[in-house]
Amino acid sequence: MTKESPFETLDKTQPFGEIHGIDGDARYEQNGFVYDAHCRLMRSRLTPDLKERLKRLEAELAAEQAAEEARQRVLADLGVAPAPAPAPPTPPRVPQPPAVAPGTVDLDAWVRGRAEYPFDKVREAIKTTLKKHVTSLVDAIDAVGKALNVPENQLRQV
């Protein structure tokens, strides 16, 4: 079994871009590579140049890891205690829908970025509870933020 590439999944601790509009299943971009909504690398979108770049990045990462392992072995052979490893980065927090009745949307948590829901469910909740029709994410954030008097600095980022 082959080892999975570290680039198979979007690393949200590193800079990345969100893709908006119509671009098939592509939702994110990082280092020139395109990822789907589940943060998985879209190999079907790899051009020959990107395939070569991915191969080079994987080789560079493997070389860095091998060099660190060799460094640790040499330090151990010399009886020198290696410096404590830095704490691993905290994985990004993935907002979870709050415990509300099934099929409902907590607009307050959503507008503050504390919960994620499919946009069609958010739009439906806005229509039902606020009696407003919105067509875009920006309009939805604006409508809910104003209706709930949420300070602008607490609104979800687009």
Image: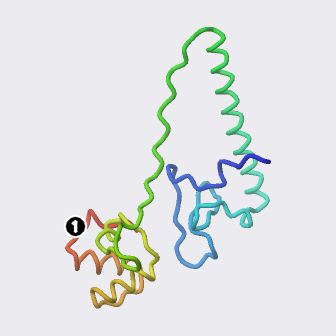
Number of marks present in the image shown:
1
Q: Taking 35 as reference, is 77 above or below it?
A: above
Quadrant where the image shows the C terminus: bottom left
Say which of 149 and 32 sits in front: 149
Q: Secondary structure at mark 1?
A: loop
Say which of 48 and 116 sits in front: 116
Name the residue that disc number 1 marks: 151
Label 1 Cα crowd, 10 Å radius (few <14 / some 14-19 / many 20+): few
In the image: residue 87, left or right of residue 59: left
Q: Who's the residue at 67% across and 18% down the image?
A: 73
Say which of 22 and 93 sits in front: 93
Q: Taking 66 as reference, is 30 above or below it?
A: below
Q: Dividing the picture into quarters, in which one does residue 8 lie?
A: bottom right
Where is residue 18 shown, x and y percent of the image? 52, 65
Q: Dividing the picture into quarters, in which one does residue 67 lie?
A: top right
At label 1, the amino acid type is: Pro
Q: Taking 119 as reference, is 56 above or below it?
A: above
Residue found at the very far front of the displayed protein: 101
Q: Who's the residue at 71% across and 49% down the image?
A: 4
Where is residue 50 shown, x and y percent of the image? 73, 57
Q: Who's the residue at 58% across and 64% down the image?
A: 38
Q: Who's the residue at 65% across and 21% down the image?
A: 71
Where is residue 1 shown, x and y percent of the image? 79, 48
Say which of 73 and 146 sits in front: 73
Residue found at the very far top of the displayed protein: 78
